[in-house]
Image: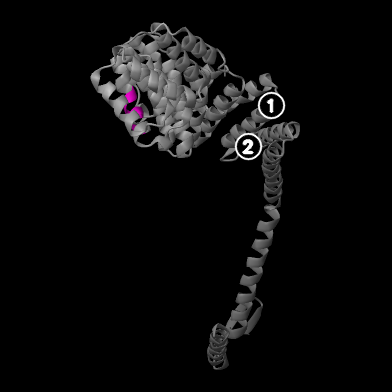
Amino acid sequence: MRAALWLLALFAIAAAVALFAGNNQGTITVFWPPWRVDLSLNLVLLLLLAAFVLLHLALRGLAALFSLPRQARQWRLQQKERALHLALLDAATQLLAGRFSRSRRAAQAALVQERRLAALDAGLPQARQIRVLAHLLAAESAQSLQDRPARDGHLQQALNESAERNAQLSPETREGVQLRAARWALDDSDAAAALSRLAELPQGAQRRTLALRLRLKAAREDQRTLEALETARLLAKHRAFSEAAARSIVRGLATELLAGAHDPAQLLRAWAEFEPWEREMPEVAIHAAQRMVSLHGDLALARAWLLPAWERMVAQPQDVGEALRVKLIQALEAGLDSVDADWLARIETAQRNNPRDPNLQYLAGMACMKRQLWGKAQQLLTQAGLGLRDPHLHRRAWQALAELAEARDDADQATAAWKRAAQTETP
């Protein structure tokens, strides 16, 4: 369709020219003494058109001729720019391939090419960012080669290049350098330096997943357990871990924070730092109660901490592993001397509802022994001694039976019980 329209347009132009030129009888007379030249108007028009075309072509040719030096310079600069970008790309490729020496040489070659371009007054708009990236690649390669002086030198130059206020750099460029510096500090086991680097980041950058992961590792290495716990919570909110992994990390840090308490007041402050869902973790509650017992603190408070774990064990026994059940029983046993009527009722009800559980039999038997209910205590502890799998509880059950037999002056049963206790294998 377009070709047909062009053809029609050409026919129309040809017809218009033919009508104008065919009936044009005009002439132009040129007087050049002593001559007189008569020219057809059509010929003059054609000559003017030809002269215009020739003049235009001549000017174009002269412009092309005079622009050759500029084009040659631009070509040379373009080749240098290509060499610069190829060197930078080669540095990144060699780094990913594990060729660290080659990567460093390529990054240094990129820096040399950039300096040459700057010396020719042909600096690139992104020259500063290219220098930062080249120094960063060189520093990364030096870090992999364990060349710390070279790494620190390139790192400092990258930080200097990205620190100028008038530099046309995105903030992510400097933040990336700082994050890599923090990672290298961690590789050098310098957790304090890593935390210092992370603290220099803007507030928004500090909450990124990568920065939080680095802070978590650095805080744990620097034994800043509370800071590590807060960081782990943020990572869990960002879904940086699976739910099971997040709970495991938080549980470990909470337990570590409790273990660092050296008196009941510190333990209470540590407990106050926990979120409600963290306090309901059986491992955390049991460890907190054990610490309270070992620090000779408030045993009633320790039992209050254990209540959610106890209720969970009683209501859903399959959700609490055997090891946790044993620890819970041991934590409760440590406070049986001051146990109140409510807890005694809970223990008795749980044992009655699950009479074949040796752990509950043991706990109920020890509670009866503390209350001087000798007959019931002997019955429950005997049943528990035959079914307990934990060596510590098994030994304690037979020791308690031996003490009961001695209280009744039954030497034979006491000897047999002490023998069973002694035969228990130590884990």
Q: Earlier in the sequence, mark 2 or mark 1?
A: 2
Q: Does the image show residue 421? A: yes
Q: How is the image coloured?
A: one colour
- The residue beneath circle 1 is 142
Measured from the top left, where is residue 408 in percent x and y? Answer: 39, 8
Q: Which is nearer the eye, 255 or 120?
A: 255
Measured from the top left, where is residue 366 in percent x and y? Answer: 37, 17
293 on left or right of 39 = left
Residue 121 falls inside the magenta stretch: no
Q: Which residues are drawn in magenta? A: 306-312
* Mark 1 residue type: Ala
- The residue beneath circle 2 is 121
Q: Quadrant of residue 326?
A: top left
Mark 1 burial class by Cα count in 10 Å: few <14, some 14-19, many 20+: many
**Quadrant of image for the N terminus:** bottom right
Label 2 residue SS:
loop
Q: Which is nearer the eye, 262 or 80?
A: 262
* Mark 2 residue type: Asp
Inter-mark Cα distance, 2 to 1: 31 Å
422 on left or right of 306 = right
Measured from the top left, where is residue 327 in percent x and y? Answer: 44, 22
Residue drawn at (58%, 18%), measured in percent from left and top?
A: 425
